């Protein structure tokens, strides 16, 4: 699998609809540091004062962030996570269940840290469990995992999305 090595490059590859969905989930379930970064990105991109950005509705803020192709590495990473924690949570759960990794509603638990790193063979089995999901969504999810923890998910570079 060919992996993007930066969240920003992966973000740029997403469809406009996926970017909007990610931004909508980011503002629907906001992490303070991600939202603060998003406000700064919106202010710079739209040439607005930060106070004016904060005064906008979360929907307007999400539309603005979703339309920005270059939100920076940190915000791109947060948006990619938001994409998967929103409408793609079933994909996360299916993959983690197939990998026998402990999770809570698609989010790895601390117990998962005690598990050995996935091998290419183990990852292939996990990926096969995702056959019912669109290939592009699977590829984006796996690349996001890699970007979050390249040490743990390094074997992804050795597998193909089928």
Image: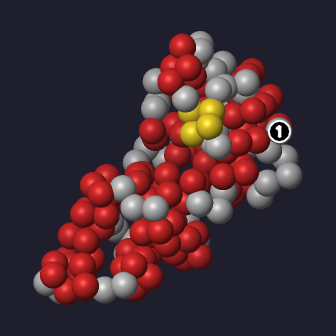
Residue 133: x and y, percent?
79, 54
Q: Nearer the viewer, residue 139 or 64?
A: 64
Rate crowding at label 1 as few (under 14), some (14 to 19) or many (20 or more) other CA atoms within 10 Å.
some
Q: Nearer the viewer, residue 86 or 126?
A: 86
Asked where in the image residue 44 lies, by quadrant, the reply is: bottom left
For the point 46% across and 62% down, which residue is it?
29
Residue 45: x and y, percent?
25, 79
Q: Is residue 162 above or below residue 133?
A: above
For the point 25% across and 71% down, which residue is it?
39
From the image, which quarter does the N terminus lie in? top right
- Classify mark 1: helix, strand or loop: loop
In the picture provided, is 84 more to the left or to the right than 95? left
Task: Tell me if I can see residue 8 in this picture.
Answer: no
Task: Tell me if I can see residue 100 in this picture.
Answer: yes
In the picture provided, is 98 more to the left or to the right than 146? right
For the point 50% across and 57% down, which residue is it?
82
In the picture provided, is 50 more to the left or to the right than 96? left
Image coloring type: secondary structure
Q: How many marks?
A: 1
Write down the residue under mark 1.
Answer: 129
Q: Is residue 25 above or below residue 97?
A: below
Asked where in the image residue 86 lies, by quadrant, the reply is: bottom right
For the point 83% across and 39% down, which residue is it?
129
From the image, which quarter does the C terminus lie in? top right
Q: Residue furthest right?
A: 132
Residue 114: x and y, percent?
54, 14
């Amino acid at each position: 699998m060919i992996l993007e090595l930066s969240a920003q490059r992966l973000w740029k590859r997403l469809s406009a609809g996926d970017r909007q969905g990610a931004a909508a989930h980011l503002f629907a379930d906001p992490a303070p540091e991600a939202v603060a970064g998003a406000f700064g990105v919106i202010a710079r991109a739209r040439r607005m004062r930060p106070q004016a950005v904060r005064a906008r509705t979360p929907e307007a803020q999400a539309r603005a962030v979703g339309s920005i192709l270059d939100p920076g590495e940190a915000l791109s990473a947060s948006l990619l996570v938001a994409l998967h924690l929103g409408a793609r949570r079933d994909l996360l759960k299916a993959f983690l269940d197939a990998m026998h990794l402990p999770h809570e509603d698609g989010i790895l638990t601390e117990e998962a840290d005690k598990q050995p790193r996935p091998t290419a063979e183990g990852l292939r089995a996990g990926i096969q469990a995702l056959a019912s999901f669109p290939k592009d969504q699977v590829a984006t999810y796996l690349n996001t995992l890699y970007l979050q923890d390249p040490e743990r998910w390094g074997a992804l570079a050795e597998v193909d999305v089928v």
